[in-house]
Amino acid sequence: MFFRVVSMAQFRYQQLASFLNQQIQQGLWQPGERLPSIRSLSQQHGLAKISVQKALHTLEAAGLIEARSRSGYFVALRKPGPKPAAKPAEAAPSEVNVPLLFQEIMARSAAFDLCPWAPVEAPDQHLLLLNRHLSRALRQQPSRKAAYYGDPEGLPALREQLAARYRSRNCALGVEQIALTSGCQNSLFLALMACCQPGDTVAVESPAFYGVLQLLQQLGLRVVELPASPEIGIQAEDLEAAIKRWQVKVCVVTPSYATPTGAALPSEEQKRLVALTQRYPLTIIEDDIYGDLGFHLQAEPLKRFDTQGKVILCGSFSKSLSRDLRLGWISGGQLHSRIVQLKLINQLSGSQAVQEGLTSYLAEGHYKRHLMAMRQKLARNRDQLLESLQLSWQGDYTTTKPEGGLALWLQLPPGIDTKTAYRPLLQQKIVITPGSLFSTTNRFDHCLRLSFSQPVTGFRRQAISTLAKTLVAGGRRG
C-alpha cells in the first residue's frame, strides 16, 4: 500500500503520521513491534528522510511509538487501563429540556473558563495581524459595502480558502459545496432544520454537547443518547441498533476532540458510521469545530468518506481563532440548496468586511502559523490542568487526556453531585460546568467538564484546589 502525498510540503509529514497512526489503531502494527526504518519509509512513501523523522517524532510525542537506541522506532507498549464499564441501557427517545443553569453559565462567559474574571494571555502576533486584516477590509469600499448585501453563500474567495484547508485534511470539497454562516451553532441549526420535522428522533453521543441539546429542544425534536467512550466516542453498531429500534433520522457527532470528553473517533469507526447512511435513510451532521486543534496529528473529517452527500459538515473559527469572529461554514451534501435557502430566510448574508479580512489573513498563511502556536499552548495547558488535579484531588477520580480540543472530562465518585457545588463555588468567583448539562438524564451528575483554554496557573490553579475541597465538603447528594 502506498501513501498518497499531497502537493503542499508542509503537510507531508502530517499525512504520514496520520497514515501510520491509522495502521497502529487498526492493529496492523502491534505493541512492541518495530516499525520500518526511516530509509524504508522514505522510499516507500516518496518522502525526504527529514519529513519521515518529523512524522515519527510527532507520533513519539503523542505516546504512540517509542525510540530505542540503535534499534529504531517501536509501537509503544500499552499500559493496562481500568476495566471498561458496562454500557448503560439504551433509553427510549425523549423530549429535551436543557436546564436554565446552561443560560446562566453562558451569560457569565464561563463555558470554557473556571475564572472568567481572571487575566488572560496577551494576544499573540497572529491575532494582532487578524485585527489588522479586518480593519483594512473595513476601510476598503465602505460606501459599497454599506449599500449592498454580499453573496448569500458567502465570499467565493473565502470559501476557496476553506476548501483548500479541507483538501489539506484529505477531504475534497468544492467552493460550490460550502456556504458561510454566523457560526457553528448556526450551521448545526440550519442542518437540523433542513433534515428534520418536529417529533423526529435524533441520535447524539452521550455525554452530548449541550448546544446540540438546546437546538433539539428549540426544534421540537426527540433525542436518543448513544453511550460514547470518553476516548474514542460512539460505535456504529450502537447507532445501527438505535436506527432499527427507534427510526433515528439524524445523528449528530463530533469525530474530532468532542466536548466534553475530548474523544477522537478512530478512522475505521468513522467509515462504519458513514456506511450506515448507505443502508438506512440516515443523515449524519458532523460538528467539526475542533478539527484544527489536534496537538500532534492533523484530524481528518468524517465527511471525507461521504460519497452520496449524506454527511453535513459544520464548522467555525470560534474555537480555533477567536470567539469574537462569528463566522462559520456548512457543507450540506444533498441538502445544500435547501440549507442555503434556509440561511437566506434566517440571515440573508454576513459581513463582507469580515469575510474579506479573514480571506487575506488565511491566504497569507497567518492562520496556519497561529494554529502551530495555539496547539503547543493548549497541550501545555492540558498538562498543567492534569497536574493541578493530581496535586489537589485526594480522593478517587478519573479523567480523560485528550490529544486535541479545549476540554477534558472529570469523573468523580458516584456519591458526588457537581450541581450542588455550583452556587458555593460561584460565591468564590469560580464557575463550573456540571456534568448534568451534557445529558437529558442524571447519568453524569458526578462529572464535570474542565477546560484548558487558558493556562492553569495563578488564580486558575488555585481555583482547581478550591474546587476539589468544595466538592469533597459539600458536593455530595443529600
Image: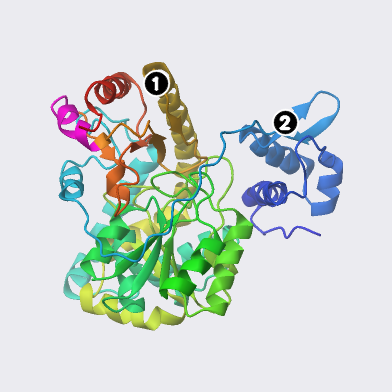
Looking at the image, can residue 86 be seen?
yes
Question: Which amino acid lies under the numbered mark 1 shown in the image of this protein?
Answer: Gly
The residue segment tinted magenta is 419-429
Q: Position of residue 273 (x, y in %)?
A: 55, 66
Q: The N terminus is located in which quarter?
A: bottom right
From the viewer's perspective, is residue 204 above or below residue 309?
A: above
Q: The C terminus is located in which quarter?
A: top left
Q: Position of residue 189 (x, y in %)?
A: 29, 67
Q: For mark 1, does the 10 Å Cα neighbourhood hold few (<14), some (14 to 19), or many (20 or more) residues?
A: few
Residue that numbered label 1 is attached to: 395
Q: Main secondary structure of the magenta part?
A: helix
Going by the picture, which residue comes out furthest to the left? Answer: 427
Count up the numbered dots.
2
Residue 421 in magenta stretch: yes
Is 355 in front, or is 136? Answer: 355
Q: Quadrant of residue 95?
A: bottom left
